[in-house]
Structure formats: C-alpha cells, structure tokens
Amino acid sequence: MKNFNDSVIYQIYVKSFMDSNGDGLGDIPGITSRLDYLEKLGVDYLWLTPVFVSPMNDNGYDVADYYKVDPSFGTLEDLEHLISEAKKKGMGIMLDMVFNHTSTHHEWFQKALKGDPKYKDYYIFRKGKDGGPPTNWMSKFGGNAWAYVPEFDEYYLHLFDRTQADLNWENQEVREELYRIVNFWLEKGVSGFRFDVVNLISKPDSFMDDEIGDGRRFYTDGPKIHQYLKELNRRSFGRVEDTITVGEMSSTTLENCVRYSHPDEDELSMVFNFHHLKVDYDEGDKWSLMDFDFQELKDIFDHWQSGMDEHGGNMALFLSNHDQPRALSRFGDDENYPKESAKMLATTLHMLKGTPYIYQGEEFGMTNAYFTSIEEYRDVESTNYYNILKEEGLAEEKILQILQAKSRDNGRTPILWNDDEGHGFTSSTPWIPFSRKEGVSAERDLKDESSIFAYYQKLIQLRKENPVIQKGSYKMVDKNHKKLFSYLRTLDKKRVLVISNFYAEQVYFDPAHHGLPDGMPENYKVLLGNYDGLSWDNGKISVRPYETMVLSIEPHK
C-alpha cells in the first residue's frame, strides 16, 4: 500500500463551504467554483463530508441512499463534474462512507420494519430484558442505545441517534452491499474514502450490561474488526492502485491503529484518533468548561507519534474537523494573537509524522461561532445536551458558555469568503448563522503576504520538498516544558527541530541542554517561522508569544 505522508488533505463540510444557488446551503457546484482557491493553497485531496441522500438528522451521517446525491447538494452529474475538474487541477476527491449505520429512512430499514426477515437481519434487533432495553449501553448522543419497535416487541441498536440504526456486519449480505457501494464510487473516479467510526462495526457475539461504563468497551475495536477491514480492502478499494483511505477510530488503542494502518496489514492507509481532543474534558466529561491540559496534549502526541513511528503505522494529523471546536479558539488565542497562534498550531501539526488534514477555514483563521442563544444551534448533539444539562439544573448562562466552547456547530458555521453581507457564501440566509467573529475572511488573507493562508502555502510546500518531514523519525525534546512543544525529525544526517510556544509569554529554549549543537546562528537555519528571524540570548533561543519555528540543524563543516 502507498504511503501518503507527502500529501495534504483538505476537509470540506459541504453544507457550509459554498452555496452556488442561493438556498443558504453549501453544495457541490459551490465546491467546483472554488477549486482555483484550493489549488492555490496546494492541497492534494478534498475529503467531502457525506453528500448522499439523507433526512439530515445528523447532517448527512444518516444515509438513506448511498448511490444518490442529496438534492440539497446537487446531482450525480454535479459530483462527476467536480471529480473531473478537481483531477485536472491535481486534486483527488475523497467521499465519506458511513458504514456503521444507516438512516432509519433507508430502504433496507423500512423493509425491516415491515417484517421482511432478510432486511431485519441487516440490522441488530434484540428482545428486551426485565421490561426494558436489552442492555444499559448509552448512545453517543445521550440516552439509551436501543430503540423500541412495538410491532416486534424488540429493540434495534443505535450507537448514535435513534434515527441511525446500526448495521449487522455479521451478515455477509450486508458486507456485499457495502462493497458494491465502494466499487460504484471508484468507477465514478473517486480517489479515496474516509470511513466514519469504522472501528465500531464489529459487535460482540452476545450483548450484556456494562456495569462500569457506557458499553463502548464491548464494541470498540470489536472481535472481527480486522477481518472485516481486510475483506473490505480486498473486495473494493484495494483493487484500485493508490486509493487513499482513512478510518475514523473512536476510543481506540495504539496497538489496533498500528494494525489498521500498517502497509503490510492491507486494511487502511491511515487512521484518525481523538485522544488529543479530550484534553479539555473535565474528568472525561466533554460538556464541561476547563482549559486544555498542555502536558497531557504533549504526552498524547508523543505516545502516538513514537508508537506509530516505531511500529510502522500511519497517522492522520488534525486538530479540527466538523465534530470539533475550532483549534484556534481551543488551543490558541483568537483574540490577542490570532495570526501567531493559528500559524503556531498549524506548524506544530504539519511537521509531525503522518498526513496533515486542513479543516475548511482554518487556513485563514476561522474561529468558534460564539453563538449567544440556543436558537442559533443546529447540531443534534448540542441540542440534546442543552436539554440534559438543563434537566440537571445548570443555569442557562453556564450551559451556553459550555456550548460556545464545545459544540460541534463551532466548526460548522459557513466559510467567510469575504466581508459582504452573505460573506461570499450565500446570497440568502445561511442554514446556520455565521460566526460572530469580526475581521476574518479568505479574501482578506489572499491580499496579505503575511497572512495565515500564505503561511499554510509555505507549510504545505515545506512538507512536499523535504523527505525528512515526510519520512523522518520523530523524537520529542524537553517533554516536561510548561510552555514549549518541541520535537526533532531525523532522516539519515538531516535533522529538523520544531519549537512551538503554546502561550503568550516569552520563554527560552537552550539547545545545549538537549544535546543539540551550540546555540549559535550558524548552526540553525530557519526553514519557516511566524516571526521574523531568530531571537538569540546568550546561546539560548528566545521564543516569543505563540512563536513557532522549523529549524534545520546544520552539520558542522
């Protein structure tokens, strides 16, 4: 299997990217109209969130027909045109495949509800226990993970919303259906796939209560997961050379991710995991307010970088996506140091070993939404938890503060293309309000040579031109520093040192203290940084607020 560490992937949340027909919703022709912008940025692949027919209870992650494009996004012809136009500009299209569950509106589930035994076995139906659900498992969106069907006096499993029924991967016919879907899109010229929560597809042989948790330990990285992924590879995308695949892995382990992404395993090209995005969860609770734990963030990155590097796994590198708050608001300072901290976060991520992902808008500094009322939110998870927290007695103001920090809608506000009324996104009212942050737009960045966008261009180019960044080993430096995240990338005799200050205070980095060449300018060449030049002080590097630097350590002459 091909290694994609020389590539950079751009994630498009279609509904919020570009509206071409004035209905307030982003669409496929809108993406096509912005291909020049994406080519200018320098990315290799465009991952589109689901564009298939859906009732949109979970923004398209509840698929009702995998073969048809949802009319709100355009037509099959529009998608074929996008695939072909993107290819002309050197970019491949990746589709988002939701194979853990379907919408309850899907024809298969509708037939199951009518009692058709063939299609009932496409899903996971079980009898209740003691007058209640089969188990006490919790849905990822809150509440029990089983929904009652009175006609059968049975429950079906839904690890997510009750309108998202889990598929029965034990059934060979289900798997064959899914392979047909992947092959259909490969024939349309798609370059790759992202598989949604794919490590949850293998359920246990028997279902039992979880006395110490929410049930996830029974179905995460389940008993037949590697068997299923190998078969998926063999029967579909593995037949087409250089198809890029990434698996979204929920609550997973390093050991499993090595297997999922090792070239010799023939499963997937790379994996997403989310451990690093739980460092601001108070005692594991997402719906809480706390500053991120910087030491934990470093420890998690170090664990995964070192482990994947040592054992040959491949990581997808990201800090933002459509399910997360904006990284700039979460880990940076979007008020006082927006440009510096945006560039710092990008550098820290992109210089790691793996394949970097850019989430739409982060390349010019988009921030959290900063909504001020529950009416502005659209996300099912956010509205569910608003009600749960209200029932628990939390004050309205506190709940809204939590949503401002943690809601998935933070990453889903429309792209701010310019400063016009519709921000260049739409000529009408957008499906979700725009972010309240002023002074941020793609157009502004494109006119500014020192912009975040211009910096991303350089960052992408740096990866493409430097084998040490693509293939080099990884080693953290100064693991316990309270402000700096520093690491070395090494390939043969080439060494690159990355230093990032995650705070608004000036601190010092002493190369000699870490066994590196003396702190003299001739020993360190700046490949990229977000301040002008290096600031030296008695052989130490002075690292300014939110400063980041990529330094080539020059061999002694």
Image: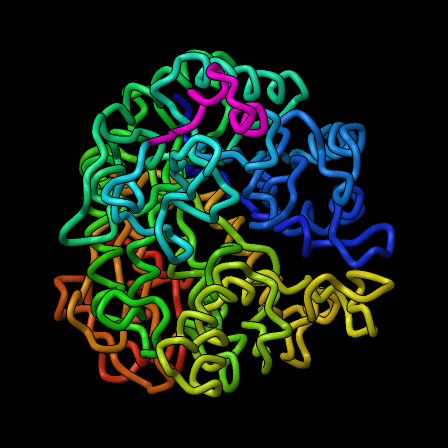
Counting labels gives: 0
* Magenta segment: 108-126
Q: Which quadrant of the figure has residue 364?
A: bottom right
470 or 540, nearer to the observer = 470
Nearer to the camera, 538 or 28: 28
- Residue 278 place in picture, x, y as percent: 31, 62
Residue 355: quadrant of the picture? top left
Q: Report x, y in % for residue 248.
A: 40, 41
**In the foreground, 348 or 492:** 348
Residue at the location (58% across, 29% down)? 110
Q: Is residue 118 magenta?
A: yes
Position of residue 522 measured from the top left corner of the image (x, y, whole percent): 32, 65
Q: Where does the image place residue 45, in percent across and percent down from the top left?
A: 58, 38
Please tell me which residue is depicted at 20% across the width and 47% down the height of the picture.
306
Kindly identify the residue that appears in the image at 42 percent across and 55 percent down.
Answer: 141
Give whichever of 485, 149 is nearer the camera.
149
Residue at x 29% of width, y 31% of height: 203
